[in-house]
Amino acid sequence: MSRVASQAPLADARVSTAWQGSWKDTRYGFAAFVLETMLLLWLGLRIVLYVRFGRDQPVAIEDLLQIFAQGLARDVYCGLALCLPMLVWFLLIGNRLFDRPWHRVLCRTAFFVYWFATVFLLVAEYYFFEEFLSRFNRVAVDYLIYPHEVFINIWDSYPVAWVLAGCAVFSAGWVWLAHRRFRLMWSAPVPWWRRLGYLVLALAALAGLSQALPLKGPSFSKERVLNELANNGGLSFAAAALTHHLDYAAFYRTLPVDEAYERCRKLLREPGSEFVSSGRDIRRRVAGDPARPRLNVVILMEESLGSEFWGSLGRPGPSLTPEMDRLAREEGLLFTNLYASGNRTVRGFEGVFSSFPPLPGESIVKRDRSRNVETIARVLKRDGYASVFLYGGRGVFDGMRAYALNNGWDRFIEQKHFERPEFTTIWGVCDEEVFARAITEFRALAQTGQPFLGTVLTVSNHKPYTYPKGRIPEDPEARKRSHAVKYADYALGQFFKAARQEPFWTNTIFVVVADHGARVYGSQSIPIRSYEIPLLIAGPAVVSRPALIGQRGGSLDVAPTILGLIGRPYETMFMGRDLLKGPAEGARVLLNHNRDIGMFRDDRMVVLGLKKSVEFYAGEPKAGEMQPLKNPGAVEKELELDCTAFYQVADDLYINERYRIDDR
């Protein structure tokens, strides 16, 4: 390439400068045509997304103008960035080489591939928006890390063959049109200094736009979906990838460190617990009766089984969870006011198992300082428990195996450990087979006489929503979410039917909890209403009579509540609380969505965002959308300080590898 570049001025000198054609007929007219095509495609996608998903939002005329004005600015920025490699190539290749037949073939082939990929990504972005009401975000970045599961899931769930055919037709048509329109450009000379000037001009425009475009994306509207419509999928994806590990203090509001710890310790202070030391530490001793039996613990974490599906939690019309409704009604403690930490399984992991706030960026399950963090498995291991984690998929996905084995679980059973499973999807072995294996494992652990922790993560309630035939009346070939939910409930019913026949039934706490809700919907930066999840606790050892418990809480509160039911003393770093002991007032929920973090308490929610932004909302999530507060008062300001302190302390403990009690 350098040889070509060094010869470019000499080659230019040999070319006649008598060119009398229009600038539009040169390679830079072609470059403008490429940019125009990208802008038109992105505009078309934005219009389609607005018609399909945005018209239901309350849209003022100024918001509508902002959608397309800010969208155009971001599209131009992304388009210029994508054109840079082409402009560099135009600079380096001389005029004589530019006209060679091999170069014409190379360019046409390259642009066929480019437009094929571009149109495919536009279609993928539409379906991504349909699923998440968001442009490409960290979820999309994660998907590329695990292509085996994701791409096969896409093939099973969407009309990929038709999309590929459409991409090929568009690409071929564009190349043909460009061939017709720019047939003169190959022989049109452009001096090297002018080619350099065009590249410098593009770089200057990019530099100027980069100063005006916020990293987080547009934020002109209180309606999250409208802000997403104004974004550009490529920029959104790049921002998500580049902020994989965030410098918390650089992007989010902070307090003096000692003040943050003081506030956090005040929030964590509860009757029956005492701090081990003062200052920058949250380690506590929780009182209990050492003579209490060491009850087994079984946690069944259900994929996407949000409260919206449960008849016992208010679903209108027929319930999709008759088995769980019956268990709750006849012999369970059903918590009716619980919210997930986020909308990813790894957020469920850190919340339920580590009682840790959902920091912005990645979950600690996937970060590089999580080889020794506090978990319920570690707490119970210190009390003599054995443990096993069962997952129907591949343990490498999202770093689940590493998180479990590095943080207290003795064994991790995954898809490769199931010999000849009867039914699998791309995500793994179906729920009922995982539950059957769990019964076998729990029986073997119980026979040793050692108390045990058994953890199960299911996979069936996930696209493409297939499951074994004959279990429920609905046809799995229909591939509907509601059918997958009914199958997940059926498999849970089969598990509890089998567990009741086992000797360990009478001395085990059984916990059913969702990792997150089914999908994100709502206008707030953190759409809390869609985060509602069930928590059902059963087992004759701890449930004497069924009850509905309205105490508000979140994923972080699951582990402390379980340990409270066991009733033995323990030490903890957990940042949640026992829902059966804490007062109703002041109950907090820690939440995350993309790069936003927040705290909900007493019908108020504060949201902390990138560039140290803050938003306030008021209302009861169950009653409808929470409304933005433009003039926050003293209550909201106090909530902001508490939220700031909680996340700041969590980040400090994690970054400095102090969210742990020992090194075992």
Image (cartoon, rainbow, N blue to C red):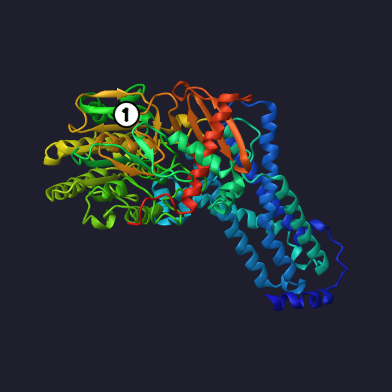
Q: Is residue 608 visible?
A: yes
- Which percent across, then down, holds residue 401? 34, 55
> Which residue: 37% across, 36% down?
557
* Secondary structure found at label 1: loop
Residue at 30% from the left image edge and 44% from the top image edge: 458
According to the image, label 1 marks what residue?
Answer: 580
Q: Position of residue 549 (x, y in %)?
A: 32, 24
Residue farthest toward the front in the current orientation of the protein: 278
State the residue at coordinates (28%, 54%): 414
Could you say which is closer to the camera, residue 159 or residue 608? 608
Dividing the picture into quadrants, the one containing residue 195 is bottom right
Q: Quadrant of the N terminus?
A: bottom right
Q: Position of residue 565 (x, y in %)?
A: 26, 34
Whether residue 137 is situated above or below residue 133 in the rendered picture: below
- Amino acid type at mark 1: Leu
Residue at point 47% right, 49% down? 653
- Pick whichever, 642 or 320, lies toward us: 642
Relative image position of residue 172 (x, y in whole percent): 59, 56
Task: Tell me the quarter of the picture where residue 158 sits.
Answer: top left
- In the image: residue 657, left or right of residue 42: left
Q: Is residue 287 left or right of residue 644?
A: left
